[in-house]
Structure formats: structure tokens, C-alpha cells
Image: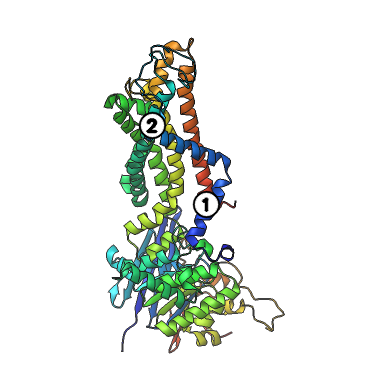
Amino acid sequence: MTGPLLEVRDLSVRFDTDDGTVHAVDRMSLELAPRQVLGIVGESGCGKSVTALSILGLLPKTATVTGSARFEGAELLGASRSLLRRIRGREISFVFQEPMTSLNPVLRIGNQIEEVLREHMDLSRAGAKQRAVELLDLVHIPDPHRRVSEYPHQLSGGMRQRVMIAMALACDPKILIADEPTTALDVTIQAGILDLLRELRERLGTAIILITHNLGVVADLADRVVVMYAGRKAEEAPVGELFAHPQHPYTMGLLGAVPRAGAAHNGRLQEIPGRVPSLAELPGHCAFADRCPRADEQSWSEVPSLRRVRPDHTVACFHPGEQ
Amino acid sequence: MSYVEAPTLSPQARRRRIYGRRFLRRPAAVVSLLIVVGAILAAVFARWVAPYSPDETDFNAILASPSREHLLGTDDLGRDTFSRIVWGARASIQAGFLATVLAMVVAVPIGLIAGYYRGWLDTVIARVTDVLLAFPFLILAVGLAAILGPSLLNATLALGIAAMPPLIRIARGEVLALREEDYVRAAVANGANDAVIIGRHILPNMTSTLLVQATLTIPAAIIGEAVLSFLGLGVQPPTPSWGVMLNAAQPYLNEAPSLAVYPGLAIVIVALAFNLLGDGLRDVLDPKTER
């Protein structure tokens, strides 16, 4: 019927720094369907956030982005500043990790929401104000009429993240990119924010890209999961499939490192030996080889390409399979 | 949290009350505010505050000591010193405020643009500012005033221009720091244009820094006006100004040192009051202040 809302093909991002070139993302491909929640999982520095930022041209000038990212068929990479400004916040919006610092401390939260509205929509001052109150109500901030004229420092972290989400949803975007939306929050507050995201997806039909290192969050919310390792896609599958039948040894390692009550490994979490490789140079072999129990000569001499192990499940490994 | 204590007040009113309470807890700031307001009122209403016209001569009381008729005595032409100090406040306050406003209006946008857009323009602006900063404020003001010619307006212009380089540098430095803030990144991600980012997100977050800088610039300009007038580059006699009075007092330093002491005290007290007021305002407006 309809094509994907967002289609990313062979996205690569390089940073030219004084210490040489860093390859943050290497030939990454993604598809996001309307109403879908796509989880992107990986360790810190694996390129999750850079992937998301590059789609909207939000990376610093030192970044070189190649490949293609199409939103409803329109190419975003290399698009004009004015086109990107129309897309940002209007069609695709962002929620960042740090709610404590992502709101301007000298502006009332209502004004900050109104600003987004007035940037993108033809609304009167009174109309924008009215809509700001509705949005605060939508994200379940109690007493929105009073809260709308408060300053960020009067709100808790969870409240601020709700305000950030309200801002992101202000113009009814088609895609919400949430970059570690709960990482900086208490566990109980995290659950509230996740419930909110789920509810908003149901009510507004917003597609969500959820970037996190927390598999629990992904299991809770996502429809599909992409596992990233060292700038490359390691595995992609529907969420149930991935958790039930992980194919990539890295995915298994991640799952083994999640604490589970009553699990049978004597309370000791399994860790993945070794550490994430430096991205200064892309290895000509499987990036996970030095940490992988299954690595063999082929792993050390070629880069594994993605292969389809089930109709909806791809993995970049020479030796996929459970255990 | 603060919202439980006074539920009937709007947030704005509560905030104003907190600022008021904090300010009253700082005696130096309160006294300074009274002095500053007093000086401004005296300057504006000099006609009614001063007992004599600044040019009125009393030949029966030349170089007189303080008395009931002449509160601070008289000068070599029998002019009332107190009246001349009151009238002289006009030149000082006017130069102090106008020079500061001029410097702000020109320097802050330059610093904002340089810091926000970077590039070659920023390099040029930053280097020129560095060169100008190599000249001390007063030297620069004296040089400019000498070029522009002696008058209060030209002295104000010279002081305003001389006050720009540090303001440009401060504004630029603030922008460089603020543009990396998460809320600026968030605004960019929400599609805000440059005008909104500069005007709504960056400028308001540097107002307290600019306010403090203004309260340092005003007294510097007041002193600068006195220096320029003293050197004959500002207000011209017989128009009263604290600098002009100091200059006129020179030949009589032995016989009537009070002729130099009173205008000197006026300069010190008013300049100090502006500085202390600025200190107090900074503490009060700082959201991290606890008391």
C-alpha cells in the first residue's frame, strides 16, 4: 500500500578530527513504517545518536554524511536549510536525553511550546497558548493551566521530559525520535515516560524511533529492533523474534547482560569480554571478531554482510544462530 | 518546593516578592540604590534641588567655607559649590547612561553575530576587538574625544565607543558558550530559525552578565566624563561638571582644598554606588542564589 515513512539507505557518517577520521556510522540502512516503533539498541558510541542526528542535518560541520535518507520520498541528506527547518519539529521531532538542560531556563515552559507552534503553524498568540495547555494535558502534567506559566527550574526531571515530549508533539509530527529519553530519569519515572510514549503512539499514530542502550525499554515499547555495533547494523528483527531467537553473538551477549529476577546464573550477569573497538579506522573484518567466541579466519578477513535468516530477520554474522 | 507556600499568588508575583526580599537583605545594595536614585533625581530636578543657579556669583563670599548660606562653601568666583555639584550631576549621569546604552546597542549585536555565525567575519571582529582592548579605556576615550572635539555629546560618544571592545568580547564569549547548550540544540531540532535562537534562547540567557557589565560600564563612563572634562575635552566651563570643577580647583589646592574634595567625593560616591548596586543585582537575579 504505502511505502515506508522514513527510508535510510547506506548512511555513512565520518568525522574529520585533528586525530584523524572517525567512522561513526558505516552503511546503515533503516526503514520506518507509519505508526511503527523502531528501537535502535547498542552500547555508547556505537553510532545510534549520530544516525538519528544525521537524518535531520543536526551534526556539526566536521561531519561528512553520505548515503540517502528519504522522508515520504523527499531526500533529507544535503537538503536546503529551509527545507530541513520545515521538517524539524513539524514532521520529525526530537526528544533528547537530558531533560534537565534541554529547556531554556529563562523562558516559561508555555512560551517554549508556543514558540515551536508559531514557528510551524499559522496560529494566533491566544491559539498557541490554548494549544500549549492542551499539550501539557496530553502528556499528563497535572494542573496545566498553572504549569504553563512556570519556569523549568520549578519542574522535576520527569515533568521536564514530559514538557519536552509535549514540545516535540506540538505540531503533530509523523515521526518522533527519542534519543535515550529515559536514561537520565529514575526508574519509576522512566516507566511513566514509556507509558506515555506508548499511549501517544496509540492515540496520535506517531511513529517513534527509540534510541536506547536499555533492552528492557526496547522490549517494552518497540515493534522492531535494530542492534548496532561499532557503527554498523549487527541484527534487525521484530522485537519478539529478536528476544526469542537472537542470531548475532553480540545480541546474545546483550541479552545475557540484562539482569533478570530468578535467572539461573547464580546472580552473576554475563558480560561480553573485551571492549568496543575504536572507530578511528574501520576494520576490514567483523568488528566484533575480537570479542566473539565464534570468530574464525573468515571473521578476521572479511566484513560480514547482512543475510536473511528468516523472512523478517537479518543478521550480519558468518556464524549466526542460537547458542 | 516553592509552590506550596503561597498558593494564592501568581508565579510572577511570587518571584517579584522573592527578588524584593533578597534585595532588602543586602544593605550595601539598598544604600547604593538610594544614592543612585538620589543622584538621578538631583540631576533631573537640579533646578529645584540646588539653592542657587550654578553660574550665580556671590562676591561677598569668595572661596568661603561651608556656612548656612553656602552648604559646601563657594569657589573662586563665589559660586555655590553644592549647587554646582547638583548641576554637575547632570553631565555625569547623562554621560554615564548614554555612553553605556550606546556601547550596548552597538557592541552586543556585533558580539552576537560574530559568536553565532563564526567564520571569517568572526575572525575579523575578534582580532579588531583584541587590538582595541590593548588600549586602556581612558586612553582610548581621550584619543577619540580629542579627534571628535570638545563637547559633552562628543565626550559621551567617545566614552561609548571606548566601552565597546570589552562588551563585544563578553557578548561573543557568552554566545560561544550558550550555542552549545542543550536547549539551543533542542530549539534547532525543533526547527527554530536563527532569529528565534539568537533573540529568544541566547540573548535572554546573557542578560544578567550584560547587566553586571552595564553596572561596571556606567561608573567607568562617569569617571571618564570627569577625566575628559578635567582635561578640557568634555564639558566646557562655565557649564558645571565634576571634572570641570576639579580642574578649576587646581590653583587653589593649598588655600581651599575643599573645592577639589567635594566634587571628588561626588565622583567616588556615585561611582561606588553604581558598582555596589550592580553587585547586589547580580546576586539577587542569580537563580542559584539561596538567600
Relative depth, front residue between A104 and B219: B219
Q: Can residue A305 be seen in this view?
A: no
Which quarter of the rendering shows the N terminus of chain A? bottom left
User: Which colour assignment does the render follow?
Assistant: rainbow
Q: Mark 2 points at which residue?
A: B48
The earlier-in-sequence mark between 1 and 2 is 1
Residue A188 screen position, x and y as percent: 60, 75
* Disc 2 element: helix
Q: Which residue is drawn at 53% across and 63% down?
A: A154
> Total label count?
2
Quarter of the figure with residue B80: top left
Which mark identifies residue B19?
1
Q: Which residue is drawn at 33% across and 51% down?
A: B117
Relative depth, front residue between B291 and A119: B291
Quick check: do tags 1 and 2 share a chain?
yes
At label 1, counting other C-alpha atoms closer than 10 Å, the crowd grade (few under 14, some 14-19, many 20 or more) is: some
Amino acid type of disc 1?
Answer: Tyr
Q: Which residue lies furthest to the right in this view?
A: A266
The vertical placement of B250 against B189, above or below, is above
Q: In this view, does B183 lie to the left or right of B142?
A: right
Relative depth, front residue between A240 and A180: A180
Q: Distance between the residues labelled 1 and 2?
A: 34 Å
Q: In this view, does A240 lie to the left or right of A83?
A: right
The vertical placement of B72 against A48, above or below, is above
Q: In this view, does A253 lie to the left or right of B117?
A: right
